[in-house]
């Protein structure tokens, strides 16, 4: 039999241990939250600094020169059935186009350097990739249209408003 003193001690030990296992909110990492324009205007960040972009709802780390997005979520599949214009939140997404007629995917100015999407034609309608305003699209063979059913393309922003397009494409 367990004596009453030992039983009391065991209960006290369990409660003490459980209490210590809880996270102290004062020990959590705190990251500053700034708007995109405030982050861009920051001139005194040190390498490794972290900031939460309150406009884009994403975490960024400073590499000594640029703010780089810290990937915090898995790739999403974004199905489309009509022409579409990319937005910043499409970054790291897979976009599928299921249409019986040809559609246009428009790349706007202002997407972040490193922006990267994959595009797939899953319907019979082809996908033509175009740019707006000051956007420059580059492809070695000047091909910017999916080649047919199940064709895929990658779009990467390699410099401000410059995008390289690769994949199963035709003129």
Image: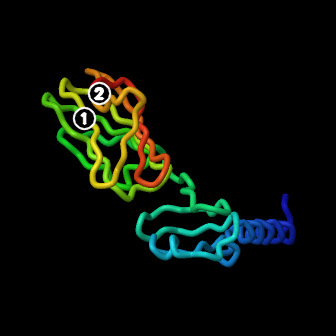
Q: Residues within 10 Å of mark 2 (few under 14, many from 20)?
A: many
How far across and how far down the image is residue 171, in percent? 27, 25
Instruction: Using the image as rendered, state which of residue 137 and residue 73 is in the foreground.
Output: 137
Relative side of 38 to 139, left or right: right
Q: Which residue is mark 2?
A: 146
**Please, is residue 30 above or below residue 102 in the view?**
below
Q: Residue at x 21, y 26 (%)?
A: 123
**Please, is residue 2 above or below residue 102 in the view?**
below
Question: In which quadrant is the N terminus drawn?
Answer: bottom right
Q: Secondary structure at mark 1?
A: strand
Q: Which residue is mark 1?
A: 128
How far across and how far down the image is residue 59, in percent? 54, 62
Instruction: Using the image as rendered, state which of residue 31 and residue 147 is in the foreground.
Output: 147
How far across and how far down the image is residue 10, in percent? 81, 66
Q: Are marks 2 and 1 in contact (CB under 8 Å)?
A: yes
Instruction: Say whether disc 2 or disc 1 marks the residue closer to the N-terminus.
Output: 1
How far across and how far down the image is residue 113, in percent? 48, 53
Q: Residue at x 34, y 50 (%)?
A: 135
Relative side of 44 to 129, left or right: right
State the scheme by which the image is colored. Answer: rainbow
**Please, is residue 37 above or below residue 73 in the view?**
below
Q: Secondary structure at mark 2?
A: strand
Instruction: Using the image as rendered, state which of residue 92 and residue 140 is in the foreground.
Output: 140
**Please, is residue 39 above or below residue 152 in the view?**
below
Q: Quadrant of residue 46?
A: bottom right
Relative side of 138 to 25, left or right: left
Relative side of 38 to 135, left or right: right
């Amino acid at each position: 039999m367990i004596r009453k003193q030992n039983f009391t001690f065991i209960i006290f030990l369990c409660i003490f241990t459980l209490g210590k296992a809880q996270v102290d909110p004062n020990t959590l990492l705190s990251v500053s939250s700034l708007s995109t324009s405030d982050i861009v205007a920051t001139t005194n960040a040190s390498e490794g600094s972290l900031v939460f972009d309150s406009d884009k709802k994403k975490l960024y780390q400073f590499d000594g020169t640029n703010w780089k997005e810290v990937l915090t979520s898995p790739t999403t599949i974004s199905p489309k059935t009509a022409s579409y214009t990319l937005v910043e939140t499409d970054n790291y997404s897979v976009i599928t186009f299921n249409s019986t007629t040809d559609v246009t995917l428009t790349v706007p100015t202002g997407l972040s350097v490193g922006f990267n999407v994959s595009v797939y034609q899953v319907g019979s309608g082809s996908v033509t990739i175009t740019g707006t305003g000051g956007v420059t699209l580059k492809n070695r063979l000047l091909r910017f249209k999916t080649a047919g059913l199940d064709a895929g393309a990658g779009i990467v922003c390699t410099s401000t408003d410059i995008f390289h397009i690769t994949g199963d494409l035709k003129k």
